[in-house]
């Protein structure tokens, strides 16, 4: 429509499928198919191949008065778009809340159950496990189990690296110290 101006609404205009295909980034066959489909739907009147294909719009062009936007409408749309943008930013930056809950909240659905599958649920679950392992390590040290290997064996889990990692964290947090290969509470 923009290629051929307002005359296309008044009378037949000669068109170039090649130009339309280049501007629309389409294959010529696709342009032919769309033109024929619009003709069948009685949106355009399309006459293929004389010397040039010609089309005209059957439905009159809408009056510009129907498309006027009031400043209040524009402000409302901007506010809605800003809220959507803020939601997306919150979704991306949030490191604690269940992402499924955030999405459901966006659609005004409330679900109090966490999905336990998103990255935040998994991370928060791991933090809970870490807190529990840290408590178990400190409990062992208080019970005079000071050798790291003995602590690992006492806290019987399949993944020994979790216990080692938590010992390192407690050391870096200066909650425990190591002396002569033995752990002590500070």
Image (spheres, rainbow, N blue to C red):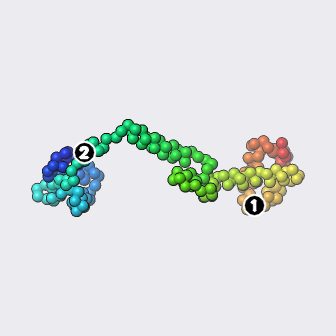
Residue at horizontal 77%, vertical 51%? Answer: 134
Q: Looking at the image, which is closer to me, 71 or 126? A: 71
Q: Is residue 62 above or below residue 31?
A: above
- Separation of disc 2 and disc 1 at Cα? 74 Å
Quadrant that contains the C terminus: top right
- Callout 2 crowding tier (Cα within 10 Å): few <14, some 14–19, many ≥20: few
Question: Is 151 in front, or is 71?
Answer: 71
Q: Position of residue 37 (x, y in %)?
A: 24, 61
Q: Residue 54 lies in what quarter of the image?
A: bottom left
Q: Position of residue 22 (x, y in %)?
A: 25, 51
Going 28% across and 55% down the picture, which residue do you hit? 26
The extreme left residue here reads 51
Name the secondary structure under disc 2.
Answer: loop
Q: Residues within 10 Å of mark 1 (few under 14, many from 20)?
A: few
Report the residue at 79% width, 43% height from top.
Answer: 175
Nearer to me, 5 or 151:
5
> From the viewer's perspective, is 61 left or right of 163?
left
- Report which quarter residue 29 is drawn in: bottom left
Position of residue 21 in the picture relative to residue 86 (left or right): left
State whether residue 80 appears in this view.
yes
**x, y (%) of residue 140?**
84, 53
Residue position marked by numbered label 1 in the rendering:
157
Q: Are marks 2 and 1 in contact (CB under 8 Å)?
A: no
Pick whichever of labels 2 and 1 is earlier in the sequence. 2
Mark 1: secondary structure:
loop
Disc sitting over residue 57 in the figure: none
* Image point (28%, 51%), residue name: 24
**Residue 35 visible in the displayed image:** no
Residue that numbered label 2 is attached to: 63
């Amino acid at each position: 429509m923009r290629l051929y101006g307002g005359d296309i609404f008044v009378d037949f205009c000669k068109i170039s499928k090649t130009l339309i295909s280049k501007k629309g980034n389409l294959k010529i066959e696709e342009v032919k198919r769309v033109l024929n489909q619009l003709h069948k739907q009685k949106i355009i009147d399309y006459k293929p191949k004389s010397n040039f294909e010609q089309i005209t719009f059957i439905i009159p062009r809408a009056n510009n008065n129907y498309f006027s936007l009031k400043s209040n409408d524009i402000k409302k749309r901007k506010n809605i778009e800003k809220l959507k943008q803020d939601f997306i930013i919150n979704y991306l930056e949030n490191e604690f809340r269940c992402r499924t809950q955030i999405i459901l909240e966006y659609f005004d659905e409330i679900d109090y159950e966490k999905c336990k599958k998103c990255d935040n649920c998994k991370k928060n679950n791991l933090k809970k496990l870490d807190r529990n392992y840290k408590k178990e390590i400190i409990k062992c040290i208080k019970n005079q189990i000071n050798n790291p290997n003995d602590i690992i064996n006492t806290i019987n889990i399949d993944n020994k690296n979790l216990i080692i990692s938590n010992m390192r964290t407690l050391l870096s947090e200066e909650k425990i110290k190591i002396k002569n290969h033995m752990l002590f509470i500070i």
